[in-house]
Amino acid sequence: VNPAGGGLDRRQIQGLVASGFGQQKAADFLPLSIDDAPKVREWLAAFLERLTTSEERASKVKRCLAFSASGLVALGLSKETMEGFSKEFREGMFTPHRQRILGDLPESPSDPYGWAWGGPRNPPVDALLMIYAPVRAACNEVVAEEQGKLRGFTVQRTLSSVSLGGREHFGFMDGLSNPYVRGLHEDGWPDDELPAGELLLGYPDTSGAIPSSPAVPRAGAPRLPVCPTDPRQSDFGRNGTYLVFRQIEQDVPAFWKGVAHATAAAGLDPSQGPEIAAKLIGRQPDGTPLPAVAGPANRRGQQGLTFADDPVGLRCPVGAHIRRANPRDALVENPKQSRQIVRAHRILRRGRAYGRPGPADWYPPGLNVVADDDLPADPAAGEGARGLYFICMCTDLGRQFEFVQQTWMNNEKFGGLFNATDPLSSGRTPEGHFTVARTPVRLRLSGFPPATRTAGGAYLMLPSRSALEYLAGIAER
Amino acid sequence: MEKDTAFETPGPVFRRARRADAPEENDAGEPPAMGGRFAMLTGQAPQPGQGAAPHWRRPSTLTAIAPLRPEAVKALRDRLTEMGRAVEDLPNFPVTALTTTHFFRLLVTDDHAEPRPELPPHLLLGTVYDGTLDEHLRDLTTVLGPALTEIFANCAGFAAGTDLAQFITRHVVPHKLLHIGAVRVSLRDIRQEAEMVAALQTFVDERMKAGAWRDATLSAVRQSCLRFVQSRPDLPQGARPRRPLLSRLLQAGALLRQVLLFLVPAAVISWALPWARQSLLHWAAAGLLVLLIVFVTGLLVIRFLELTEPDDVPKEQPDTADVEAQEDFQVQNQFTMLTPIRASWARRFAIGVMLWFGNHLSEHLWNRGKLVGVGTIHFARMLRPFGGRYMLFMSDYDGSWRRYLGDFLTVGAFAVVPIWAHLKGCPKTRFLYFTTPGFGERFLRFTRTNQVPSHFWYSAYKDFTMYDIMRAGRIREGLFSARTDQEIQKWLWEL
């Protein structure tokens, strides 16, 4: 069924789009290399039975599958079809220009040449198998089972996540504000509602147009939807989306020591460190926002945030992480216009933490990061490494994900700042400042080192179920 | 108070005489810019020997376009590209020593994503400068002389012994639309004020750390800052000089003449109608009616063209590697685009009219740091080289290309789209203004396809945004003039 009128066919959409799988506390991500395409196609045909779609809610274990450009080429997509994918996806995450956009600068700690996986030194990530289970033990079992069934692939490594009760390793609640699509997600704050085309190929986006989508010849793909612009072609992209996967390593002691150091250097009492940290993020560790709440709560008790009544940043600093990531109504002077512009630069986040939580003495008193599930056997790939698997989805990598990274997060001049990058960004320069607006005189913090770095990553695509079916059947054409 | 070159009263602007040896037409097929008195009327770039632009239109811009000898093109392009990789570290080309120059670009024009066989390659020099053109040319030839001569020696008609400044002058193409972000702010102002802001910030940091202002009144804080700046004679010791009344009057006069330029014909035509002669009110109404008829007719002609012209948006994603290789190294970027104007006299006429209006709107209305609501543009200019059949767009701006073009498609769309719609390959509009879904993506593809790399591009203040420059002016202003607590508080929040 291919419902008309822009309705969403949830059976076609992979489950991760509709849900972050909050009930599944354990997740493993397996970057894969394709060695033998025919075997992979065979495996794929069988795997489709186990693929989790957005329709299906009951199953305890969730499985999703993404491919990179190199993976799709290996499976036999033609050059013409590949040209229908976005430039960013085709080029991958580490061209010289893209390194400047994302902050993965040459010879910086985030340099792709130093990545643990992905990046120019490692085998290309052709595919990513994503497995979610309610608890760690179950996850390990399913992963072992899936590994046994894999054919034609080499598993590059297993990226195991941990559950920190919704927090990330610095101690703050994470993933609190996400956009939603009516009919796919539960309704949230009205400003967060997006047209489906911002998150799914094949539907109108904020501009009213259907984002460009790769096409395959109709003859070989009768079960894919017809391409809206050319009846001789099938739309390979519809109900799929682009998926960004970045391993962001977090140096927890560096973060909190940096905060303490900067607090002291500014002449404040060291006990004010947590207060300063909350200013960096824009939220208290428990998620309570610093910005004002806009209007009454909606029926689910959610409230929108507003920065427009705080142009100077007295409550929430202009450079705070949440204000950069989503400037809401304060990007330009006119709040309505601001919301309109911001809408075209939203992403759907599905990140997961990884690595053993740090000891309590790394954190200020009262703050503690603990796992609420068993840890994986090897809680982090590197020696004591921990961080975040940043995962997000969008239909236009350049306009959405990369724009946010470049123009908001890594932009030292964001919102009229002098030179300050996002306190959490892996592209941050060490000499950057952070300004906390105050009356009568602002506080300018400096001298805290970057506490995150990019340690791996890839641009992928989360195809629709029928697109995966098409890939499985390419040889039979 | 220091004398500031950017605020001299206009003198040479009035000079009318054109140099006897000025050529009638240059190699780019353009009649030479009308300088002198007409420069005041149009705000266009002056010609040598004719002083500076009216000083509410400073800094000025210089664009020279000269045809290249075909055999020299490749080597020159490679040389400029190579130079462009180390802009500030070239011993033989010390651009950082230029004292009049805000922005400087040198490029070979044929580096499009798609080939342009009809347009032979040219060398393009584009600058933004303080003072008079003569002073600027002297600066260029003194500082960059031998190397710049060597580069221009690749041009057709540049023989041994040719005078560089004269050669450049002969190939000047006047701008049709100029936007200046920080009007009347010289390079020296920008550098001095930036230094003042940095020094003040450090001073404030130290005072705060020492807890010196714990119970200080707002006024005491400002006094303390003022004393600090006064102890540093290298920093500006007063607010930016006020603009002389004469200058304001002259600008008002220029505006009046510009308005009369279309009011007078309307008045004359409507006078021909007997009905209009009944009273002044009738005459005015008839005049407006004439203007309205002209406007509506023009719009209908354009609409007809929109319906009949082919949809020529580039189908393929262009190869943008060359252009991207130059982007996002600092907070500023540049944009250079050379595009044919749609091939009909109506389109050429319409874009001429719109550029004229845009130019004067920028002159009188968008002259406080923002162009059509976009506050990231240092300098933007549109020219019509090659017999008026092409549009050359050059811009020096802050932030990423995507953000810049994004602003054009949102905040500034009402003014940008109606001009660009006359260009070949621009996605279709309806009545120049209305667009259809997907316009943005096609517009981006169109601009990327027509962009040319600026092989060599230099900014004299690459780390400062427009916002920084405007704010530095406000900080300087506030330091010397904020009086009420409210004013002082607002001023302090800028620091």
Image (cartoon, helix red, strand yellow):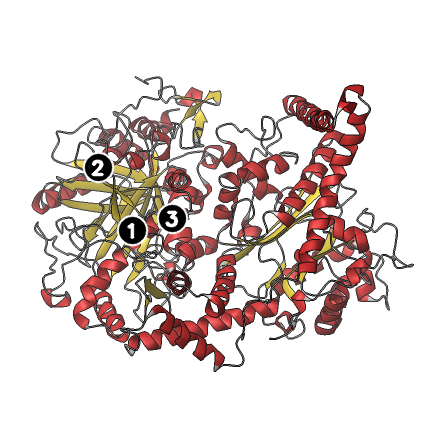
Q: Between residue B114 and residue A124, name the one nearer to us.
A: B114
x and y percentages locating residue A227 in the rendered image: 44, 23
- Say whether disc 1 or disc 2 marks the residue closer to the N-terminus: 2
Q: Chain of mark 2?
A: A
Q: Between residue A248 and residue B145, name the one nearer to us.
A: B145
What residue would you read off at disc 1? A322
- Say whether disc 3 or disc 1 marks the residue closer to the N-terminus: 1
Nearer the camera: disc 2 or disc 3: 2
Amino acid type of the residue tagged 3 in the rendering: Val
Circle 3 packing at 10 Å, graded few (<14), some (14-19), many (20+), is many
Task: Please give the name of the residue rendered at 82% of the width and 57% of the height, measured from the top-left corner.
Answer: B170
Q: CA distance from mark 1 to mark 2?
A: 21 Å
Residue A216 visible? The answer is: yes
Q: Between residue A101 and residue B463, name the one nearer to us.
A: B463
Q: CA distance from mark 2 to mark 3?
A: 28 Å
Amino acid type of the residue tagged 2 in the rendering: Pro
Q: Quadrant of residue B264?
A: top right
Circle 2 packing at 10 Å, graded few (<14), some (14-19), many (20+), is few
x and y percentages locating residue B363 in the rendered image: 65, 49
Nearer the camera: disc 3 or disc 1: 1
Amino acid type of the residue tagged 1 in the rendering: Ile
Location of the N terminus of chain B by quadrant is bottom right
Task: Please give the name of the residue rendered at 80% of the width and 26% of the height, measured from the top-left corner.
Answer: B271
Is residue B251 toward the left or the right of residue A417 in the image? right
Task: Please give the name of the residue rendered at 79% of the width and 49% of the height, measured from the top-left corner.
Answer: B28
Q: Which mark is residue A296?
A: 2
Q: Secondary structure at mark 3?
A: helix
Q: CA distance from mark 3 to mark 1?
A: 12 Å
Is residue B453 toward the left or the right of residue A205 in the image? right
Location of the C terminus of chain B by quadrant is bottom left
